[in-house]
């Protein structure tokens, strides 16, 4: 199957499975497993700690052994890990499931982008990242509809459906996903720690030797510290501080379907605008777009934390989600322009590790503030944590300009 079309199709199916799982996932943790705000954040912290520990080793495996194999194994493990919380809805088992899910995720995080870039080139791959994200937001409606319908029977069923769907996708990848341009290591070096260490060191040297990559690494770390607040606390924030409007004969769980559906619409709109307006081949344009996204997100989270109207809070949340939906593929496109082919998966994994480290460090702090002061206060602090990215982006834009002038002079 053509690699571009395969990637788009897999993103569509993943969006359906993912939206089915997460539409009621956090509600399930609060209402069935009985987690409090601090425990909710600790679940995310354990997940990100798992990603931090495994991100680079699995990224190196992808560069040394096979990116295709890494992606297939990763999705199978992710499906199995997420399904565990259906069988054992306790805090301890949920923590274990997040370790397994995070382990599986690290097999895919750098490898999938690197695989696609090797198969179809940087230009087409960058376009595919935005197109896949755009279509994923639309097709996630099917997962949301399935989640709401199944949740009326049991909150566990949408999670079970999505996790099984990921395992099915991994099986389909065995048959449909090809790998024609990947250059394996020599047989004597394959699967050895020596080859992995060499690739890892090359990745570290690439970041240390290029100031623009180092600055983006720091920005990714800060963004990770911010994200745990909105990701883990918005659901308990709504459940504890607001009364959901009556939907007549429909159960209250339907509201989570409405919230997810509108979030997908906003995400589709933002990725469509980004796809049409942002020049992916221009590093300066990408840098300005990323900076604007983060500055707007910080303002909106501060506003959300201080609003009282239910619908106003939801409107802020949808706008925040839209900006984050655009930020992700734009960030991937920014990195994809600068990363060398030989260690691309490893370097993507290193940036994933920076995000995970930020979440691991920031998560417990935000969770403690939410439990002992208030969720609104914790959300406000998480928004303020984004402010250091503004001077970093200014420096990044300056350094990119210097690099461009040197290239033109050369």
Image: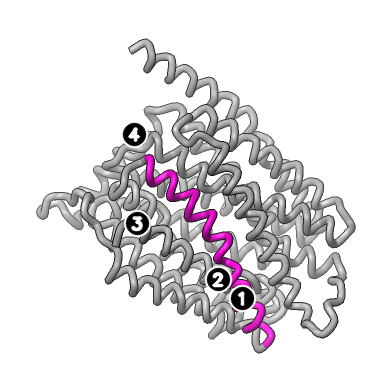
Q: CA distance from mark 3 to mark 2?
A: 21 Å
Question: Badges 1 and 2: C-beta atoms under 8 Å apart?
Answer: yes
Mark positioned earlier in the residue sequence (1 or 4): 1
Q: Which mark is residue 205?
A: 4
Q: Residues within 10 Å of mark 1 (few under 14, many from 20)?
A: some
Q: Is residue 45 left or right of residue 340?
A: right
Segment colored magenta: 123-152
Mark positioned earlier in the residue sequence (3 or 2): 3
Q: Does any portion of residue 378 appear in the rendered image?
A: no
Question: Badges 3 and 2: C-beta atoms under 8 Å apart?
Answer: no
Q: Is residue 139 left or right of residue 65?
A: right
Q: CA distance from mark 1 to mark 3?
A: 27 Å
Q: Which residue does the image show at 48% across and 30% down from the upper left?
A: 283
Q: CA distance from mark 3 to mark 4?
A: 18 Å
Q: Which residue does the image show at 78% across and 63% down from the upper left?
A: 237
Residue of label 3:
58
Decide: is 290 above or below 397.
Answer: below
Seen as rendered, the residue at the extreme front is 276
Residue of label 1:
91
Quadrant of the drawing holding the C terminus = top left
Mark positioned earlier in the residue sequence (1 or 3): 3
Task: Give yes or no for residue 111 being in the magenta stretch.
Answer: no
Q: Which residue does the image show at 70% across and 54% down from the upper left?
A: 366
Q: CA distance from mark 1 to mark 2?
A: 6 Å
Q: Does any portion of residue 36 appear in the rendered image?
A: yes
Residue of label 2:
95
């Amino acid at each position: 199957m053509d690699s571009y079309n395969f990637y788009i199709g897999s993103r569509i199916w993943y969006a359906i499975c993912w939206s089915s799982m997460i539409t009621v996932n956090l509600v399930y943790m609060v209402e069935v497993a009985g987690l409090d705000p601090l425990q909710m954040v600790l679940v995310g912290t354990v997940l990100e700690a798992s990603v931090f520990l495994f991100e680079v080793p699995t990224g190196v495996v992808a560069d040394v052994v096979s990116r295709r194999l890494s992606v297939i194994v990763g999705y199978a493990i992710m499906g199995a890990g997420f399904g565990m919380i259906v069988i054992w809805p306790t805090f301890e088992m949920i923590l274990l499931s997040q370790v397994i899910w995070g382990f599986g995720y690290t097999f895919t995080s750098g490898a999938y982008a690197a695989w696609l870039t090797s198969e179809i080139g940087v230009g087409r791959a960058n376009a595919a990242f935005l197109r896949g994200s755009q279509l994923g937001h639309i097709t996630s409606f099917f997962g949301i509809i399935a989640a709401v319908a199944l949740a009326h029977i049991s909150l566990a069923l949408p999670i079970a459906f999505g996790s099984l769907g990921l395992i099915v996708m991994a099986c389909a990848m065995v048959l449909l996903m090809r790998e024609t341009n990947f250059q394996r290591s020599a047989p004597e070096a394959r699967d050895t720690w020596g080859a992995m260490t060499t690739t890892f060191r090359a990745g570290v040297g690439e970041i240390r030797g290029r100031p623009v990559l180092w600055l983006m690494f720091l920005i990714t770390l800060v963004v990770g510290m911010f994200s745990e607040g909105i990701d883990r606390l918005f659901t308990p924030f709504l459940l504890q501080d607001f009364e959901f409007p009556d939907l007549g004969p429909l159960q209250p769980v339907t509201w989570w379907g409405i919230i997810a559906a509108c979030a997908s619409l906003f995400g589709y709109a933002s990725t469509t605008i980004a796809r049409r307006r942002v020049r992916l081949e221009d590093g300066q344009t990408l840098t300005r777009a990323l900076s604007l996204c983060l500055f707007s997100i910080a303002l909106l989270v501060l506003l959300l934390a201080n609003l009282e109207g239910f619908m106003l809070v939801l409107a802020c949340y949808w706008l925040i989600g839209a900006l984050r939906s655009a930020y992700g593929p734009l960030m991937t496109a920014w990195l994809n322009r600068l990363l060398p082919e030989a260690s691309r998966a490893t370097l993507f994994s290193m940036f994933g590790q920076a995000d995970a480290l930020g979440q691991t460090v920031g998560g417990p702090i935000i969770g403690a503030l939410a439990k002992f002061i208030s969720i609104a206060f914790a959300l406000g602090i998480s928004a303020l944590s984004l402010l250091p990215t503004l001077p970093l982006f200014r420096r990044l834009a300056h350094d990119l300009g210097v690099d461009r002038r040197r290239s033109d002079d050369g």
